[in-house]
Image (cartoon, helix red, strand yellow):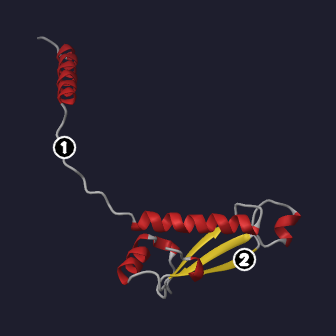
Amino acid sequence: MQFDTEFTFKLSRSGGAGGQNVNKVSTKVMLEFDVQNSALLSEEQKVLLIEKSGKKVNQSGVLQLISQTERTQLGNREVVVKRFYALIKKIFAPIKSRKATRPTKSSKEKRLTTKKRDAEIKKARRKDW
């Protein structure tokens, strides 16, 4: 799915170190994606996205992601879009069901040998009266 048409970008000045460049160039990028009014997502997907993304979705149902690591606006924009698609991929990935397995022969033997060794160590600690 291409969500690019539903993105809203807000720009502001980044904080932190960087000298004059930080004070005069708006390189911080905030991506906003309106989950509630998205035409690309089904109702189940909207609910799942809101539940699993936690604090990234505000009260009005808008997903917000911020990037200010790069020195350019374009770089931060690319980073935040990649982060959005990674989040979507992670949330909508199907959960693998656990397949029940039995312990292997070697793991059983290893467990028994360590039990015997520990028993011998404890037996050696006892005092004979």
In the shown orientation, is residue 2 left or right of residue 123? right
Say which quarter of the image contains residue 83: bottom right
User: For residue 52, what is the image quadrant?
Assistant: bottom left
Q: In which quadrant of the rendered image does the C terminus lie? A: top left
Q: Residue furthest right?
A: 20
Residue type indicated by callout 1? Thr
Closest to the observer, 90 or 56: 90
From the image, tell me which residue sits under label 2. Answer: 11
Farthest-out residue, front? 1
Q: Residue at x 43, y 77 (%)?
A: 50
Q: Position of residue 104 (x, y in %)?
A: 19, 32
Point out the tag, 1 or 2, that comes first from the N-terminus: 2
Q: Amino acid at mark 2?
A: Leu
Task: Examine the rendered structure and indicate whether residue 108 appears above or below residue 63.
Answer: above
Q: Is residue 66 above or below residue 38?
A: above
The residue under label 1 is: 101
- Is 30 on the left-hand or right-hand side of 52? right
For image coordinates 18% across by 36% down, the residue present is 103
Q: Nearer the viewer, residue 26 or 95?
A: 95
The local secondary structure at tag 1 comes to: loop
Q: Residue at x 16, y 13 (%)?
A: 127
Q: Residues within 10 Å of mark 1 (few under 14, many from 20)?
A: few
Q: Measured along the vertical axis of the image, is residue 32 above or below residue 97? A: below
Looking at the rendering, which quadrant does residue 4 occupy? bottom right
Disc 1/disc 2 C-alpha distance (Å): 52 Å
- Please state which of residues 126 and 3 is positioned toward the viewer in this rendering: 3
Looking at the rendered image, the disc whose residue lies closer to the viewer, 1 or 2, is 1
- Using a 10 Å C-alpha cutoff, classify the residue at mark 2 as few (fewer than 14 neighbours), some (14 to 19) or many (20 or more): some
